Amino acid sequence: MSVVEIKENEFEEKIKNGKVLVDCYASWCGPCKMLSPIIDELSEEIDTCAFYKIDMDDAEEVSEKYNIVSIPTVLLFENGELKKQTVGFKSKEELEEIID
């Protein structure tokens, strides 16, 4: 499975079932660009979690709801409930721990 880009109007629908990791990023963000290939790799290796990314420049409501003030921010949901939230670049190992 690969990382799917979603829009703000799809967000609530995408997070409501199962385990879901959302990469909150911006196209101009250096650390976001470093994190993206790691999340892509994890999406190919872990089939118990759905992977999405959302451009925070186009997601003001999501940003406000989850108090996202820095990017990259990674959100982990289980059946629509926020379980974990991290800010900044994370290694593959750190992300694997977040998902487990």
Image (cartoon, rainbow, N blue to C red):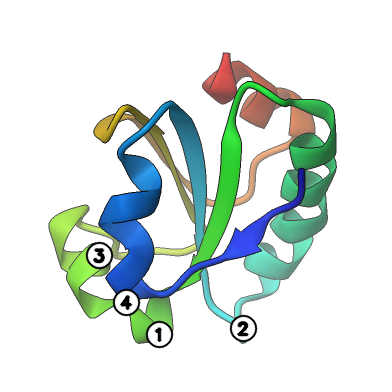
Which quarter of the figure is the C terminus placed in?
Answer: top right
- Give whichever of discs 2 and 3 has the lower sequence position: 2
Which quarter of the figure is the N terminus placed in?
Answer: top right
CB under 8 Å between discs 3 and 4 = yes
Characterize the local packing of mark 2: few (<14), some (14-19) or many (20 or more) Cα atoms within 10 angstroms. Answer: few
Instruction: Give, as a three-letter code, the residue at label 3.
Output: Val
Residue 81 pos. (x, y %): 24, 30
Instruction: Give, as a three-letter code, the residue at label 4.
Output: Ala
Mark 3 = which residue?
A: 62
Give the number of marks: 4
Q: What is the spatial separation of the Cα atoms under label 1 and label 2, in whole angstroms?
A: 9 Å
Residue lying at 48% horizontally and 36% vertically, measured from the top left: 20
Characterize the local packing of mark 3: few (<14), some (14-19) or many (20 or more) Cα atoms within 10 angstroms. Answer: some
Q: SS class of the residue under badge 3?
A: helix
Q: In this rendering, which labeled residue sits more in front, label 2 or label 3?
A: 3
Residue 6 pos. (x, y %): 49, 68
Q: SS class of the residue under badge 1?
A: helix
CB under 8 Å between discs 2 and 3 = no
Q: What is the spatial separation of the Cα atoms under label 4 and label 1, in whole angstroms?
A: 6 Å
CB under 8 Å between discs 4 and 1 = yes
- Give whichever of discs 3 and 1 has the lower sequence position: 1
Mark 1 = which residue?
A: 57
- Pick the front one: 11 or 98: 11
Residue lying at 47% horizontally and 64% vertically, measured from the top left: 71
| Residue 59 marker | 4
64 on left or right of 93? left
Q: What is the spatial separation of the Cα atoms under label 2 and label 3, in whole angstroms?
A: 17 Å
CB under 8 Å between discs 3 and 1 = no
- Pick the front one: 53 or 4: 4
Mark 2 = which residue?
A: 27
Characterize the local packing of mark 4: few (<14), some (14-19) or many (20 or more) Cα atoms within 10 angstroms. Answer: some
Q: Which picture quadrant has residue 86? A: top left
